[in-house]
Image: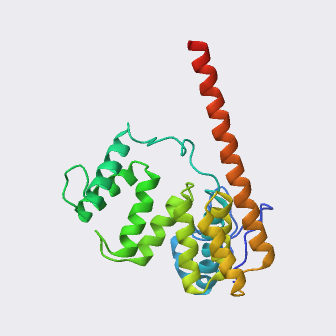
Amino acid sequence: MSCVPVADDGGEACANCGKQGSDTVKLKSCTACRLVKYCSVDCQRAHRKLHKKTCKQRAAELKDEQLYSQGHERPEGWQKKDPEAITLLGLKYHLGDKYGHGRLGLQKDMQRAVELWTEAAELGSIKALHNLGNAYETGKGAQKDTAKAVEFYAKAAMQGHVVARHNLGCYEGKKGNYDHAVRHFLISAKMGLKESVEKIKTMFIDGEATKDQYAEALKGYQDAVEETKSHDRDEAETRKQIIHRKA
């Protein structure tokens, strides 16, 4: 049978044998692409050769949809100083940072830093995810592994880490995937990263991005900067009012 998207009209059938779903025949979706369903593992295996190409294509599309649709705003509290410092994950992240730079009397030890960042990342530290991406990209503290670096950057970017998002754009640009690179840079530019605007400007000059994309990046960046300034003014005014009430 041909591999086609499963309809939502109640007439769902196994993509391999055509058996209709019922109270006794439970169909399960292909977990990778969600396009087809099967009545058994045997049918899924039998249909694999026909379905493989479509499955991989749709799985990649779903991954891109998730990557580009999330992380368009910085995490709440990003403007505060060390918002993670009082938590266990924060302590592990910052201790890893000290080992990474050889601070607080600690001997520089990138391998130990990576171990601590890994623990912090497992506890939910976005900054640790980004640092792990750097470690695997550069081979400092971990065996150089571009695929792992991109994986960590992607996890951080989807949670709002702007530099990780920019790094993904650089990665795609180096591969010649200019459309993907611009999409990343547009997101990070609109989050207030000037370097991303400059990247799109360079790509525009080189014919790898359009004039409209550069204009969109520039406007998005300017809006983000203005929003940050407005936020800072509001916080300053609030502090003044609190101080005035205390006085």
Q: Quadrant of the N terminus?
A: bottom right
Q: Quadrant of the C terminus?
A: top right
**Image quadrant in which you'd find residue 37:** bottom right
Answer whether residue 58 is visible to the viewer in this image: no
* Horizontal and vertical percent position of residue 141: 28, 68
Q: Residue at x 71, y 84 (%)?
A: 205
Q: Residue at x 34, y 77 (%)?
A: 144
* Horizontal and vertical percent position of residue 7: 77, 67
Q: In the depicted view, which residue is nearer to us: 144 or 26?
A: 144
Q: Residue at x 33, y 55 (%)?
A: 97
Relative vertical location of residue 203 with respect to residue 86 in this rendering, above or below: below
Q: In the depicted view, which residue is nearer to us: 45 or 69?
A: 69
* Horizontal and vertical percent position of residue 215: 78, 69
Q: Residue at x 41, y 72 (%)?
A: 148
* Horizontal and vertical percent position of residue 117: 34, 56
**Image quadrant in which you'd find residue 235:** top right
Q: How is the image coloured?
A: rainbow
Horizontal side of 127 relative to 184 (left or right) equals left
Q: In the depicted view, which residue is nearer to us: 103 or 4?
A: 103
Q: In the depicted view, which residue is nearer to us: 118 or 200?
A: 200
Relative vertical location of residue 193 with respect to residue 234 in this rendering, above or below: below
Horizontal side of 194 relative to 217 (left or right) equals left
Answer whether residue 191 is visible to the viewer in this image: yes
What is the number of callouts on the image?
0
